[in-house]
Image (cartoon, grey):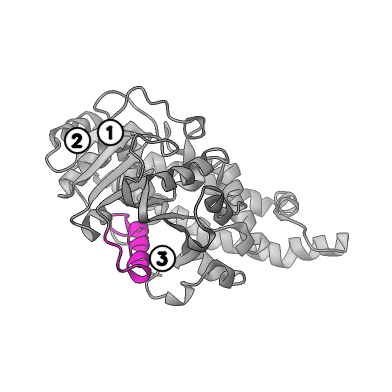
Amino acid sequence: MRLPANQQSHGITPKWSHDDRSRQAFQRTVRENVIRKLGTGSRVLFDKKVKPRFEKNSGRPFKNRQELKTEMLAEPYYQAHLSIQRTAQELMWASATYSIERQLIDLNARAKQTGHTLGSLEVDPELQPPRYITSLDIHCQPGGYCLDLGDDDVCAGAIYDKGAYMYGSGQGGPLNDRGAKMVLRYIKREWPELKPNRVLDMGCATGTNTVPYCIAYPDAKVHGIDVAAGLLRYGHARAESLGHAVHFSQQNAEKTKFDDESFDLIVSCILLHETSTKALPNIIAESRRLLRPGGMMVHMDAGGFADMDLFRQLIFDNETYNNNEPFWSTFRELDIEKLAVDAGFDADKVIYHCESFDKAEESSNKPRRALKEASTAVVRGFYLLVGGK
């Protein structure tokens, strides 16, 4: 098994003690065992017991994942799998928050001292984050993304930075920016002539997937927007400490303050599934409004259920019911290409594409329709909604 890279420190990284690192290592071991061992066990349970039993008793295969869920939840092994999985998620956040709470005053002071030497930060105290973000603690992050303890508070950002890295078991790379690098790899391969002067990252969180655009396009002005002030404060301090100019502002991607045709490239990384059926079309329409002629939007997110077998649908569906991801399953059933066309993008300029996380797996870089049966390629990659103007 390939071990994940250690998370790279930066100017606003919390100081982790020996005990902190021990808790984090324990949580990672629990999580990996949930995914690899309990997940495999549940698959065997499905293949060898639940599926044959259902087909024998009903005389037909499962119609949908809801039928399968009912049968699987009656099995003690699967109940234990889900319970331990939820515990592992809560342990993940706890292993980060213990230390962050202890040193929060210092973290806030360090973030404030970074100033605005390279980029900028604009927080809007009048902005009301949408309810689909604030109604629950998404991914079980304590306090949620919009936790804000004061004018200089970076608590939510510090928790998110560590939690997101641990959630991905370090597979996002030392700076947890592999999503943006994957998008950039795709853009530079398919549209090498694109040289954006202005880039917008929607739902940028702490900017881990915003900074790579500063590196890829050093002459471009890079903006990052999010509804969560604590994430932005932390992200600004992080970017400044790494020596990159990002202009962060607290805005809702459904309706921003930017003028029409303000950007050559608009991107997001795992934003769309955090929204809602009402908000998502607004975000895509806003992307089109903000694009200049010849510009591109590339939204990276999880793939649809149509490309998965029934058991894999069940496993991913658990994020909705057991990990505070209310829009996760609904998003995976939407026709994203149609939403882009409905927003005004030309159908011949809209692409729904799977790009592998693993550079070695170039064979998985195929259009969505070629991946209907390639479940392993789907799991190892993410889908990109691409729209040109």
Q: CA distance from mark 2 to mark 3?
A: 32 Å
Q: Secondary structure at mark 3?
A: loop
Q: Which residue is mark 3?
A: 357
Q: Secondary structure at mark 1?
A: loop
Which residue is drawn at the image coordinates 34% and 47% (left, top)?
A: 201
Which residue is drawn at the image coordinates 32% and 23% (left, top)?
A: 125
Identify which residue, 371 or 353, lies in the foreground: 353
* Foreground: disc 3 or disc 1: 3
Magenta span: 170-195
Amino acid type assigned to the residue bearing label 1 in the image = Val
Identify which residue, 97 or 270, lies in the foreground: 270
From the top left corner, tell me how far across and down residue 75 is, in percent.
Answer: 71, 52
Q: Which residue is mark 2?
A: 111
Q: Which residue is mark 1?
A: 154
Disc 1 crowd, CA 10 A, few/some/many (<14, 14-19, 20+): many
From the top left corner, tell me how far across and down residue 207 is, in percent.
Answer: 30, 46
